[in-house]
Amino acid sequence: MAAEALVLVTVARTRGSVPREAGAWMAVAAGGITGTVGGGHLEFDAIARARAALAGADLAAEVRYPLGPSLGQCCGGVVWLRFERVAAGEDLAARLPGEALRPLALFGAGHVGDAIARIARELPLALHWIDSRDGQFPAGPPVRGWRQEVCSPAADAVADLAPGAAVLVMSHSHAEDFDILAACLQRQRERRDLPFIGMIGSRTKWASFRQRLAARGFGEAEWGRVACPIGVPGVAGKQPAVIAVAVLAQVLALPA
């Protein structure tokens, strides 16, 4: 729900070279902004219009922006922005335009999991965030397309993941990681509908897990598809935000 009144700005349609696609949106409140419709003078003017409306001015339903002639932006195309008032307490998620979201299952709400979730808010991802502990998720409602679930044992949530989900395993314990991973491989054996399974950890951890998976009856053709360590190569640093960027880049690079 919107905590305060705001104006929802949406790219209604475009022509030529423009910074954002139709459906991109930005929510403008008196004290903050979520999302973006492309930056530059286009966004500056849209924010000014929205905040003037919040202060009581009339609000045009749709405004045409020729980027080159009127705003001096080098894109040179034309953007039509739609403006809609959203009252305090109204469900903003229900007003947002439809968007193709890749399902992403994230096991673990620790430091790295939290960093991934914060960055994923701005990405075309439908996050199913799972932790076995109460009180781990941040306060406030999740964004559109998200689901936050407390499930103990966490591995039980694997059966309910969306088909086609990319899976990231980074719980608070190695024992739980192993059980989640084994459940994912079992689901792959039965349904073959999890295109990516990645687990945080060192090469030593992964070597130990491979032996244990083999003892469980999983062959190399099965555990060999697991990405561990996760993240695109060449990104150094162990800070949670650095790891999150590398992991989400890997997810976004997956075939559609």
Image (cartoon, rainbow, N blue to C red):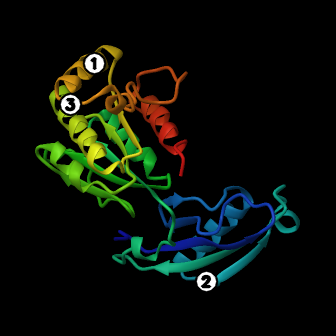
Q: How far from the left and from the top, in percent, is residue 239?
A: 41, 25
Tally the marks. Answer: 3
If you read the primary sequence from the N terminus, does the residue marked by circle 1 or circle 2 appear first? Answer: 2
If you read the primary sequence from the N terminus, does the residue marked by circle 3 or circle 1 appear first? Answer: 3
Residue furthest left in the image: 152
Q: CA distance from mark 3 to mark 1?
A: 10 Å
According to the picture, the residue beneath numbered tag 3 turns out to be: 178
Q: How far from the left and from the top, in percent, is residue 1?
A: 34, 71
Question: In front: 170, or 122?
Answer: 170
- From the viewer's perspective, is 229 left or right of 30? left
- From the viewer's perspective, is 131 left or right of 124? left
Quadrant housing residue 108: top left
Q: How far from the left and from the top, in percent, is residue 180?
A: 21, 38
Q: How far from the left and from the top, in percent, is residue 25?
A: 56, 66
Question: In front: 93, or 46?
Answer: 93
- From the viewer's perspective, is 251 left or right of 133? right
For image coordinates 27% across by 22% down, the residue present is 210
Q: Residues within 10 Å of mark 2 (few under 14, many from 20)?
A: some
Does 172 appear above or below 5?
Answer: above
For image coordinates 30% across by 13% down, the residue present is 204
Q: What amino acid type is highlighted by mark number 1?
A: Lys
According to the picture, the residue beneath numbered tag 2 turns out to be: 59
Q: Residues within 10 Å of mark 1 (few under 14, many from 20)?
A: few
Quadrant housing residue 116: top left
Q: What amino acid type is highlighted by mark number 2?
A: Leu
Q: Secondary structure beneath disc 2?
A: loop
According to the picture, the residue beneath numbered tag 1 turns out to be: 205
What number is the disc on residue 152? none
Q: CA distance from mark 1 to mark 2?
A: 58 Å
